[in-house]
Amino acid sequence: MEPVTDYDSFSEYALQTKQQLVKNRYFLTEDKDAELQANLPTELKPDGKTHPLKGVLLIHGLGDSPYSFVDIAKSLQEKGFLVRTVLLPGHGSRPADMLNVDYQQWNDLVEKQVDLLKQEVDEVYLGGFSTGGNLAYSYAAQDEEIEGLMLFSPGFVSNEPFAFATPWISWIKPWLINVEPSNVTNYTRYFMVPTNGFAQYHNTTTQVTDNLAAQTYNKPVFMVLTEHDSVLDTKAIQDLFNTRFTHPSNQLIWFGSQPTSINGNTRYIHSYNPELRISNMSHMGILFSPDNTYYGMNGSERICRNGSEMTDDEMARCQAGEEVWYSAWDGRANEHIHARLTFNPWYDQMVQDLSATFSLSPSL
């Protein structure tokens, strides 16, 4: 699927993207409309405002979709934001479309969308999840007009020691795993990503760390991290937050094993919650409200593939709907079967802290 680049408005961009997805997406379920809606760029306008003061562009992560921000977008709309999400090139259609994607295409998309958003609002903010957090920061670092950043599990530092080699490996081994998606039904994210996807993610981390080594960032930043993140070195990212992001309004939420408390600009949340059968917080879980109909406490989607030591029997029992606990990948903390934690029991607190960071008014 070719990247959508020839447009002059967000509505044109969204329409052209929909036309491309209709032609090129490998559909996983019978509900094609739901799949399209999850993967399409969206725009939410605040009620009763002909000219919103604030706008935010939200950027999803590697292998993900605009659905990553379905709840956060609504919360920000209620705070008076004009909210837009994007679909990064290579995403939303089929994993093979990421074989030749380049991270500069992602940067170009962010730049063009920011330019369009500036035409509609007085203040522009950027938000990002994982790889999207890298793209958001890297753009903001060179544009003083960006008012602040909302970063959810930003992928600044990988915990994979050989991530640096992925740009070379991608030429030799395009797929690190090769599994046919015969029983895959999760339509909000790719089941697997080609090696080039990881290579381009690595390029975004280099972009971030080079920028942060050269200069601090002095606009307000709200960040959320989890100690048990299976793909990021979140301790290193926390150190960057504390040393390279300097605005006095900055706030960090850290989900982990220490007691719930507030220390300076960091809220520590003890993520173990036996009442909800939660062992720890996952990389993606921070994004979604418990009320989310797909990923929430009573949502329709359960990610059972959740650990390198998970047995076939445990996988089958999880998929059959047995009661399970929830955690990050490989975050099993007891003898129970663990599915991925795909919702945030502290979602409302997270939105409150985000609002405090940017001095937002209560919900409209």
Image (tube, rainbow, N blue to C red):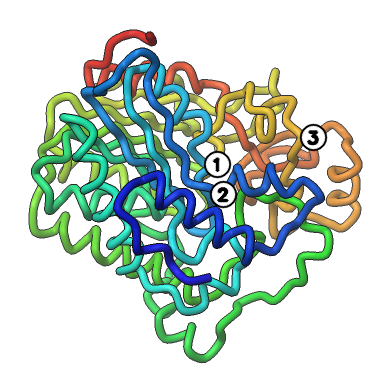
Circles 2 and 1 in contact, beta carbons < 8 Å: yes
Q: Which residue is mark 3?
A: 324
- Horizontal and vertical percent position of residue 269: 45, 24
Q: Is residue 29 above or below residue 47?
A: below
Give the crowd class for mark 1: few <14, some 14-19, many >=20 residues within 10 Å. Answer: many
> Taking the image as drawn, is residue 86 in sight?
yes
* Residue to which mark 2 is pinned: 39
Q: CA distance from mark 3 to mark 1?
A: 24 Å
Q: Which residue is mark 1?
A: 67
Label 2 secondary element? helix
Quarter of the image where one finds residue 24: bottom right
From the viewer's side, name the closer residue of 269 and 318. Answer: 318
Quadrant of the image occupied by residue 104:
bottom left
In this view, the mark in front (3 or 1)? 1
Q: Please state which amino acid type lies under the numbered disc 1.
A: Tyr
> Does residue 195 sit above or below 219 in this rendering?
below
| Residue occupying image coordinates x 38% and y 9% | 364
Amino acid type, callout 2? Asn
Q: Is residue 168 left or right of residue 279?
A: left
Residue type at mark 3 is Val
Where residue 95 sits, quadrant-wise, is: bottom right
Quick one: label 2 or label 1, which is nearer the N terminus? 2
Say few, some or many: other residues with alpha carbon within 10 Å of mark 3 (under 14 / 14 to 19 / 20 or more).
some
Mark 2, residues whose alpha carbon is within 10 Å: few (<14), some, or many (≥20)? many
